């Protein structure tokens, strides 16, 4: 109880600090939205800033509990933006303020996509399009269960890291891969020396070494 309450309290406080709404808690998962019930023009930017703060908190929280002998896994976050049906559902005897729709379902799929990518935060292209001066990098085109076309996914980053030479070289290597340039293999191999523990570099290096020179990831995210 101490572990779970400490974690959920920390996550909820961060969401509230960004003027988000906690919709529900299911086990150790938190469903939050921005832009409702009060409209927010910058809802996408708020959600991403919130996710980065939650990531900082959860990694520190995780490290603290690992020191105490509890091997916690990483927190994974998925963000999407779009139309949803939001309101009280359940009828007269019971109601639950919730959000439903494809946009909500895709956010859940993006959370799961972190397992495929090795990342902790995964956001859709629709989120990026709502943020002027977005700081982050492309992760890949994801095949999502129930979607006829791949979804372009990104990893948001802190401003300093997004502007670093490492990420600049990652973008160059990614562009080679996305355009089918065989030099992508050597570009990602060179990046391993600079970023040996970077999950996206490792993922795309393995893919290009295996002869897959495209940014569409074949594994289906369910």
Image: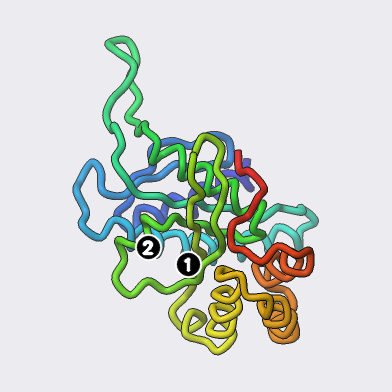
x and y percentages locating residue 80 in the rendered image = 41, 50
Q: Are circles 2 and 1 on residues that touch, CB within 8 Å?
A: no
Which residue is rendered at x = 52% and y = 87% of the image? 164
Q: State whether residue 209 is above or below residue 153.
A: below
Colour style of the rendered protein structure: rainbow
x and y percentages locating residue 67 in the rendered image = 76, 63
| Viewer-nearest residue: 22 or 2 | 22
x and y percentages locating residue 81 in the rendered image = 35, 49
Residue 128 badge: 2
**Residue designated by label 1:** 156
Which residue is rendered at x = 71% and y = 53% of the image? 72
Which residue is rendered at x = 29% and y = 56% of the image? 43
Residue 127 badge: none
Q: Is any atom of residue 6 visible in this view?
A: no
SS of the residue under disc 2 = helix
* Residue 208 position by quadrant: bottom right
Query: How crowded is the residue under tag 1: few (<14 C-alpha within 10 Å), some, or many (20+)?
Result: many
Q: Nearer the viewer, mark 2 or mark 1?
A: 2
Q: State whether residue 95 is above or below residue 56.
A: above
| Viewer-nearest residue: 175 or 45 | 175
SS of the residue under disc 1 = strand
Query: Gap in Å between the C-alphas at discs 2 and 1?
Result: 9 Å
Q: State whether residue 18 is above or below residue 94.
A: below
Q: Is any atom of residue 217 visible in this view?
A: yes
Quadrant housing the C terminus: top right
Which residue is rendered at x = 61% and y = 61% of the image? 119
x and y percentages locating residue 127 in the rendered image = 37, 57
Relative to residue 5, is residue 194 drawn left or right?
right
Relative to residue 42, is residue 176 drawn left or right?
right
Query: How crowded is the residue under tag 2: few (<14 C-alpha within 10 Å), some, or many (20+)?
Result: many
């Amino acid at each position: 109880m101490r572990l779970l309450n400490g974690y959920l309290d920390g996550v909820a406080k961060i969401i509230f600090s960004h003027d988000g709404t906690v919709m529900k808690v299911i086990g150790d998962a938190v469903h939050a939205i921005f832009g409702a019930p009060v409209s927010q023009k910058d809802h996408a930017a708020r959600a991403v800033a919130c996710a980065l703060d939650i990531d900082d908190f959860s990694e520190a929280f995780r490290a603290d509990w690992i020191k105490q002998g509890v091997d916690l896994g990483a927190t994974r976050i998925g963000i999407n933006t779009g139309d949803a049906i939001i309101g009280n559902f359940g009828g007269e005897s019971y109601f639950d303020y919730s959000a439903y729709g494809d946009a909500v379902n895709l956010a859940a799929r993006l959370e799961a996509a972190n397992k495929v990518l090795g990342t902790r935060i995964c956001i859709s292209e629709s989120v990026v399009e709502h943020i002027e001066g977005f700081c982050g990098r492309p992760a890949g085109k994801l095949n999502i269960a129930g979607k006829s076309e791949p979804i372009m996914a990104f990893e948001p980053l802190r401003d300093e890291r997004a502007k670093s030479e490492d990420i600049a070289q990652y973008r160059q290597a990614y562009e080679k891969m996305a355009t089918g340039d065989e030099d992508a293999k050597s570009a990602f191999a060179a990046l391993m020396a600079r970023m040996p523990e970077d999950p996206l570099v490792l993922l795309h290096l393995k893919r290009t070494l295996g002869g897959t020179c495209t940014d569409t990831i074949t594994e289906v995210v369910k």
